[in-house]
Image (spheres, helix red, strand yellow):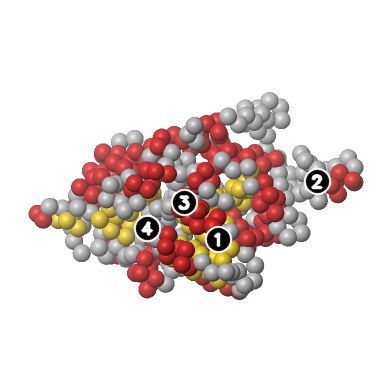
Amino acid sequence: MAFKPANNIQDLQYFGEFGGVNPSISDASTYTFLSAKTMFDTFEGNADGCYLYSRHSSPSNLYLGEALAAMEGTETANVSASGMGAITPVLLQLCGAGDHVVSSRTIYGGTYAFLKNFAPRFQVNTSFVDITNLEAVENAITKDTKVLYCESVSNPLLEVADIKGLAKIAKRHHLKLVVDNTFSPLTISPAILGADVVLHSLTKFINGSSDTVGGVVCGTQQFIDDLRNVNNGASMLLGSTMDSLRASSVLKNLRTLHIRIQQHSRNAMYLAKKFEEDGLKTVYPGLTSHPSHELFKSMMNETYGFGGMLTVDVGSLDKANDLMEMMQGKNLGYLAVSLGFYKTLFSAPGTSTSSEIPEEEQQDMGLSDGLIRFSIGLDADIERTYQMMRSCMENLDILDLELGCKTQH
């Protein structure tokens, strides 16, 4: 039977303390006990259903974690105060001094900076590779490698990871495959394809309203218990705890994720096809021109399309900036980082979300100055949106109509 992540979310039933249709929010930082022994047992993690202190856990956080684990098909999950608050504890839990990580070269700038600049302080080093080249991945593995790290769909170049292929490599070398699925919730289910740990920045598509920062680690019960261990758990000791009020807010928004992802995908597919027809250098996994189009199709949960992210290269940073400013002026979206909002968001990642990556490495991976990353919104009339965007491009001579709409460089 096909994996149906939205059904798994829908089938969870939570009632509030007084019968409310939404679970009650646990608005407390600490919890009382009737016996001192129960407090001790809870501190040691041996008292199910009891809560000690909200940095350890809270009912609101556990509700959200349970729903996200159901979505990803893992045993359980642990929510955190940010996406980086999920990523960094996982890597520190799995790696110690002298260990090695093999990572995709195209990942979120914050993750890149952590692996490249911060983790070496703890004698954890990383080899960055073309994740689409499985031979290169395997050749980068050493006797000290503990983790393979990638994004299902990479930020910002939209490279697609062969998760089944990577899982086979990880298993063969006794490594943990850690996959950031932020760009493709519902669309791709990495744990079903063989990933050991699945991460999300909840800030993006899952929450969807750009008002909350959060993250989640989805994995086995044992691994999540290890992260929460009061003596040596990285999530517990680094203290990146999600607030209960925010957890409740994300859980409510999660209930509409399946509807939103379908609309994001429909709109992105429409625009990607139109931009490509206009001669723009357009990258979108749903286009047959994408080098990993067939791979994506083989992994996707078909109902949800190819996601809401696309890129267009307009040739130079000046043209990219002019276009984004003009589109914002026409209320076609916002010149802003992040993604998954109801409005379209656009940015030039080379000077924003990927600016932590040195320029020469950006060039090596194909991240050009003129690249614009679009997070396509939930516009009801996407044909009107396209016509208005096209008009902006014409005004800036990005489309050369006399030469068949070829991008000027």
The residue under label 1 is 173
Q: Where is residue 256 in the image (x, y as percent from the top left)?
A: 49, 34
Q: Is mark 4 on a helix, strand or loop?
A: loop
Disc 3 and disc 1 in contact, CB within 8 angstroms: no
Q: Nearer the viewer, mark 1 or mark 2?
A: 1
Task: Indicate whether 269 appears above or below 151.
Answer: above
The amino acid type found where label 3 is placed reads: Ile
The amino acid type found where label 1 is placed reads: His
Q: What element carries label 1?
A: loop
Q: From mark 1 to mark 2, how far is it between C-alphas?
A: 34 Å
Q: Position of residue 51 (x, y in %)?
A: 77, 44
The residue under label 4 is 157
Disc 3 and disc 4 in contact, CB within 8 angstroms: no
Q: Where is residue 31 in the image (x, y as percent from the top left)?
A: 79, 44
Q: From mark 2 to mark 3, how far is it between C-alphas?
A: 35 Å
The residue under label 3 is 163
Res 46 label: 2
Q: Tag 1 or tag 3, which sits nearer the N-term?
A: 3
Q: Tag 2 or tag 1, which sits nearer the N-term?
A: 2
Q: Is mark 2 on a helix, strand or loop?
A: loop
Q: Tag 4 or tag 3, which sits nearer the N-term?
A: 4
The amino acid type found where label 2 is placed reads: Asn
Tell me which residue sits at (30%, 36%) in the image. 381
Q: From mark 4 to mark 1, how far is it between C-alphas?
A: 28 Å
Q: Tag 3 or tag 2, which sits nearer the N-term?
A: 2
